[in-house]
Amino acid sequence: MQVKPLIAGLGLLATLGLIGGGLGLWKYRQMHAAQGMGGFAMPEAVEMVEAQLIPWQPRSRLVGTVIAVRSVNLANEIVGVVKEVNFNSGDTVEPGQVLVKLDTSTEEADLAAAKASERLARSGIEVAEADITMAKSVADLAHSTLKRYKSAATASSVSESDVDKATSEVERAEASRQRAESSLAKAKAERDQAAARVQQIETIIAKKTLAAPFRARVGMRTVHPGQYLAEGTKIVDLTELTDDIYLDFAVPQEYAQRVSPGMVVSAKSKLLGTDDAKITVVSIDATVNPVTRNVRVRSSVPNPGYKLKPGMFIDVEVPVAPPVDSIVVPATAVRRAAFGDHVYVLSPMDPSKMPPLPPGAPPMPGPPPMTVHQQMVQLGANLGDRVVILSGLHAGDKIVSGGSFKLRDGAMVAVVPSPGAPSTASTPANITEVSEKH
């Protein structure tokens, strides 16, 4: 039982011995090769780039949210039972298109009765107007008779009793006319009441017919015929379809004064079809959020094909300072360490310090070797494949852009071409910073 662990241990020791022997042999060959070269060390091959001075404008990257120009939550104002549903989920509806109808059979019966009452009231008005006409004629005749009797009484051809009788007829005629006018006023009031009742029932019927207020895309359908809807039940969301849509983002309060209506800012999203879409600021909120201390800004974004939908997010870059001339270098040139960020600056090598070539060795091809020294730098904004240098370098300084991981301070290097490396000479005139997300 003790043999197997012993064999395994011996095998492990043998493996470690073989690995150690291989490393020793490799080291011996390296030392032998160096002795054969007379102690000469070949320079390290590196790529070089110049620190460039370019105009750069600090920008803050923010996250914007797409907001519909108009959107409503369609709901019923009056209780009822669904009779018709004329849309499906995701449909595009036009203004005035009927989406949902509630059952109105009871209201339609009440409407017929109210219209009948209205017609009856109108007939009462006609009768009252005829009575007024008749009473007016009788009153005119009584006034004419009274006037004639009064003239005859002056000539003593008519007795005083006849005059009094004519006066009574006039009073009765005037009373009849006043009653007819009162009847007319009552009939008109009944007509107005019946008309109001008709309008009230028609309003209820109209409120049980829900139509689209504007051209919109409907959300998910959740109602069906026969379903009872309590007052204020959510039926469907409507989002207006427009060629432009709102994009809201929050700007920190310290940068709010640099944003104004009409200002053009950059937006980046695959949904926009470009990495540098230009959007226009429409308005700025009048208050600052007391929790985040940010100011809400609303901008307008083109929305061809209605690809943008409310709730989507888009990266927005807002200028937070005027353009300044800044030094930028490739991000590959910067070495990060616990003691600080640094780059390797190239300088011509002193010929007196160049080690001699071994006897019989051919001269080194290419330009003469150079030396590097470690230069501490202060980094600024990250521009993707480049980085802003705040201090430590000057424009035109030659630095190592590739192969710096194998260098040490004072190392001898040979510059080799880098055909695949981007040239900072082609840097656009305006570089944007991605400073932080809010």
Image: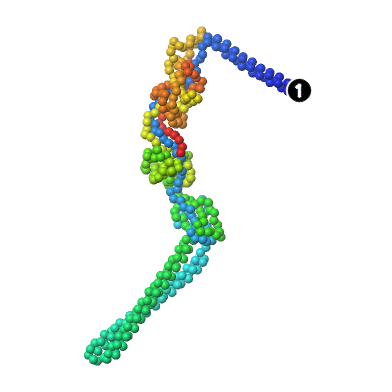
Residue sitting at 39 percent across and 24 percent down? Answer: 395
Residue type (three-letter) at the residue carrying disc 1? Gln
Residue 55 spot, x, y in % from top left: 38, 30
Q: Which residue is mark 1?
A: 2
Residue 344 or 241: which is nearer the viewer?
A: 344
Residue 413 seen anywhere in this rendered image of the structure: no
Count of picture labels: 1
Q: Residue furthest right?
A: 1
Quarter holding residue 222: bottom right
Relative placement, left or right, of 307 versus 125 is right
* Above/below status of 152 relative to 213: below
Residue sitting at 41 percent across and 29 percent down? Answer: 427
Residue 269 spot, x, y in % from top left: 46, 39
Residue 244 spot, x, y in % from top left: 42, 46
Q: Residue furthest top?
A: 359
Residue 88 seen anywhere in this rendered image of the structure: yes
Residue 386 spot, x, y in % from top left: 45, 29
Q: Residue furthest front?
A: 290
Colouring method of the image: rainbow
* Above/below status of 122 relative to 33: below
Residue sitting at 37 percent across and 29 percent down? Answer: 325
Residue sitting at 61 percent across and 15 percent down? Answer: 24
Dot 1: few (<14), some (14–19), or many (≥20) neighbours within 10 Å? few
* Above/below status of 209 relative to 326: below
